[in-house]
Amino acid sequence: MAVALWTATAVTALQWGAVTADAAETAKPRTVKVRLTKRGCPTKLTVPSGPVTFAVKNVAIKGVSEFEVLQGPNVIGEVEDISRGSTSPLTLTLDPGEYRTQCLDAKGIPVLGRLVVVAPA
């Protein structure tokens, strides 16, 4: 009886719109290629708001590197231990605004970049 009651309640909630899926959560992420070079990561990236997958490829740095996305002082997403020649994904859902990226150059020094997230047209 409890299962039938729960099912009826869930159906009623769906009928009245009490349970909805957020469109951003169900949208397919856009893929943005990011290349880590001896100079570090790109100085500027522009992406649409919503779900984004950064395909981060270490093309030149010996050893391992990393890629971070920061909002203010907070790291909101990162991939680490990206060895030379490999690609690692980082998927985030981003609101419009300005963010920073950070990665390491060939000497292990942090390099900052700018990430601009724009609202869809």
Image (cartoon, rainbow, N blue to C red):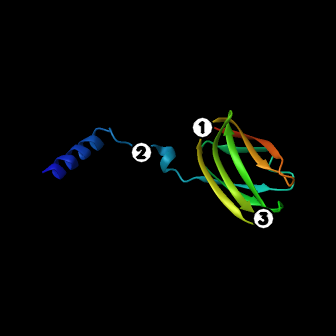
The residue type indicated by label 1 comes to Asp
Work out how far the residue at label 2 is from the one at label 1, CA to CA, in angstroms.
17 Å
Q: Residues within 10 Å of mark 3 (few under 14, many from 20)?
A: some
Q: Earlier in the sequence, mark 3 or mark 2?
A: 2
Residue 51 visible in the snapshot:
no
Frontmost residue, 21 versus 111 = 111
Q: Residue furthest left?
A: 1
Which residue position is annotated with label 3?
A: 84
Q: Crowdedness of circle 2 by 10 Å Cα count: few (<14), some, many (20+)?
A: few
Amino acid type assigned to the residue bearing label 2 in the image:
Ala
| Tag nearer the camera, 3 or 2 | 3
**Left or right: 55, with 43 as reference point:** left
Q: Residue at x 16, y 49 (%)?
A: 2
Q: Which residue is mark 2?
A: 21
Q: Is residue 20 above or below residue 65?
A: above
* Residue type for callout 3: Arg
Q: Position of residue 17 (x, y in %)?
A: 32, 39
In-front residue for pair 97/74: 74
Sort mark 1 into few (<14), some (14-19) or many (20+) by Cα contacts within 10 Å.
some
Kind of element beneath mark 2 = loop
Q: Label 1, secondary structure: give it.
A: loop
Viewer-nearest residue: 84 or 25: 84
Instruction: Please state the horizontal and vertical placement of residue 105, each as a whole percent of the image.
Output: 84, 51
Q: Which residue sits at x=72%, y=65%? A: 86
Which residue matches tag 1? Answer: 95
